[in-house]
Image (spheres, rainbow, N blue to C red):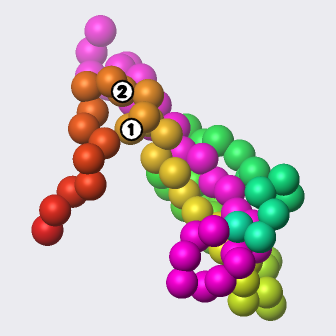
């Protein structure tokens, strides 16, 4: 298979959000009402979805959206330890 026809790696990303209890920590007021935006095949499409949701909730200072790099959790060889520096 040539590199031109090789499919792109699928790097899944989850976009979700909810209302926080306080701004200093990502602890949600009600986990049952989290807004699960979706799972996206790459970071670029996840970022576009995140931006859209973040802009639509700009009037609520306690509302926050996040991007989770699911592909890191699906690859058992990937080190999930926090990166230093």
- Real-space CA distance between mark 1 and mark 2, rounded to the nearest whole angstrom: 6 Å
Judge left or right: residue 43 versus residue 65.
left
Mark 2, Cα crowd under 10 Å, few <14 / some 14-19 / many 20+, is few
- Asked whether 50 falls inside the magenta stretch, the response is no
- At which x and y percent is residue 71? 44, 35
Up the image or down, 77 lies above or below 73; here it is: above
Marks 1,2: beta carbons within 8 A: yes
The structure residue drawn at horizontal position 46% and vertical position 46%, both measured from the top left corner, is 69
38 and 8: which one is in front?
38
Which residue appears at 26% of the width and 47% of the height? 81
Q: Is residue 53 visible?
A: no
Residue extending furthest top? 1
Give residue 25's quadrant in the image. bottom right
- The residue singled out by tag 2 in the image is 75
Q: Is residue 2 above or below residue 9?
A: above
- As drawn, the label of residue 72 is 1
Q: Which residues are magenta?
A: 1-27
Left or right: residue 80 compared with residue 20: left
Say whether residue 1 is visible: yes
Label the magenta part by its dominant secondary structure: loop
Q: Residue at x 54, y 57 (%)?
A: 67
- Residue 54 position by quadrant: bottom right
Point out the image quarter for the C terminus. bottom left
């Amino acid at each position: 298979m040539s590199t031109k026809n090789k499919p792109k790696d699928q790097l899944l990303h989850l976009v979700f959000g909810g209302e926080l209890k306080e701004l200093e920590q990502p602890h949600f007021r009600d986990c049952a009402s989290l807004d699960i935006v979706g799972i996206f095949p790459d970071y670029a499409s996840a970022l576009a979805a995140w931006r859209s949701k973040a802009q639509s909730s700009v009037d609520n200072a306690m509302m926050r959206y996040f991007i989770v790099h699911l592909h890191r959790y699906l690859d058992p060889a990937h080190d999930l330890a926090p990166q230093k520096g």
